[in-house]
Amino acid sequence: MFREERLQDIVEELKENGRVKVLKLRDKFNVSAMTIRRDLITLENRGLIERTHGGALLSDDIRNWIEPPIIERMNVMAEEKKRIAVWVAEYIDAGDTIFLGSGTTTLYVARELIIRDDITVVTNSVPILHELSSNSNMNIITVGGFLRRSELSLIGAFAEPVLKNIRVNKVIAGMRGIHPLYGFSCEHPEELMTDRMILGLSDTIVIVADHTKIGQVATNRVAPIDQATLIVTTTEANQLHIKKIQEQGIEVRVV
C-alpha cells in the first residue's frame, strides 16, 4: 500500500469510528508504530485530525465539514454560486465543447447555459444531464459509470475509458478543497481517479468554488494547484489564500 492510500484509509476509519489507536493501526497496516505516528503528524499538519495520547481524533473542522448530499447543498451559498455561474457562462465561447463536472456550482453553471445552442456539453453529472436535456438544440454527451448516489455523478472503471478518449476546449469543475500548498482535494477516494482524469481533458481548466472551499483541504489530494488555468470564486474568499495561489501563476477571478 502506498503511503497516501494509508493516509486515506486512516481518515476513513476516523470518519467511521471517531477515533483511532496507533497500535491498532500498526497491526492493521503491518508497519511500525513510528510509521503510524509520522502518518498522524502528517494528517494533523493538513488539519484533518487531532492527535491524542496513543492515537488521534477527527478534527472538529473536518467533522463539521463532511460533505452532505448534493440535494442538501443546492441552497448553500446559492447567491455566490449564482454569481460564479453567470461569469463562467460568459467565459464559454460559441463553438466550445466543454466538460461540466458534478457538483452544485457546476449545476448552477448548467442553468445559465440552458438557452445556448452553440456549444457541446460533456458531463458525468445526472442533475446536469437532466437540466440541459430540456434544450433540444444543445449537443450533450454523457459519461457512463458507477452511480455515486450522494453526488448523483457517474464515476469509476466504466467512466474512465470514455474520459481517456475525450478532449474538450474547457473543463469546468468544482473541488471540495482548494489550498495553495495542498492543491485540489476531494472527499471520497472512489472519485479520485475520475477527478484526475477530468482535469486532463483540456489545456483550459476552470475551477469554480464558493468562498468556503478556498483554503480547505479534503481527504484525498487530486492535483497540485497549478493544474488549474483559472479559479473562479467570490469576494468573500480568504484574500491571503487567493494571493498565495496567484503567486504561483494561477489566475483567480473574484466575482
Image: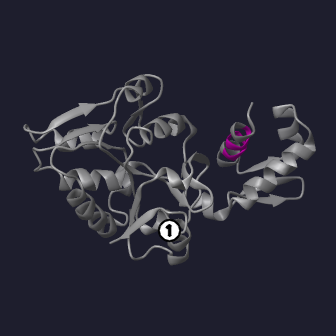
224 in the magenta segment: no
Quarter of image, res 6: top right
The residue at the point 92 percent across, 46 percent down is: 34
Near-viewer residue (20 or 244): 244
Q: Position of residue 249 (x, y in %)?
A: 50, 63
Judged from the image, the secondary structure of the residue bearing numbered disc 1 is helix
- Magenta stretch in the rendered image: 6-11
Q: How is the image coloured?
A: one colour
Judged left or right of residue 114, residue 3 is right
Magenta: predominant secondary structure element?
Answer: helix
Q: Which residue is mark 1?
A: 246
Quarter of image, res 222: top right
Judged left or right of residue 174, residue 220 is right
In the rendered picture of this protein, how many numbered marks are placed on residues?
A: 1
Q: Disc 1 residue type?
A: Gln
The residue at the point 11 percent across, 41 percent down is: 134
Q: Position of residue 103 (x, y in %)?
A: 37, 49
- Is residue 14 depicted above or below 147 in this figure? below
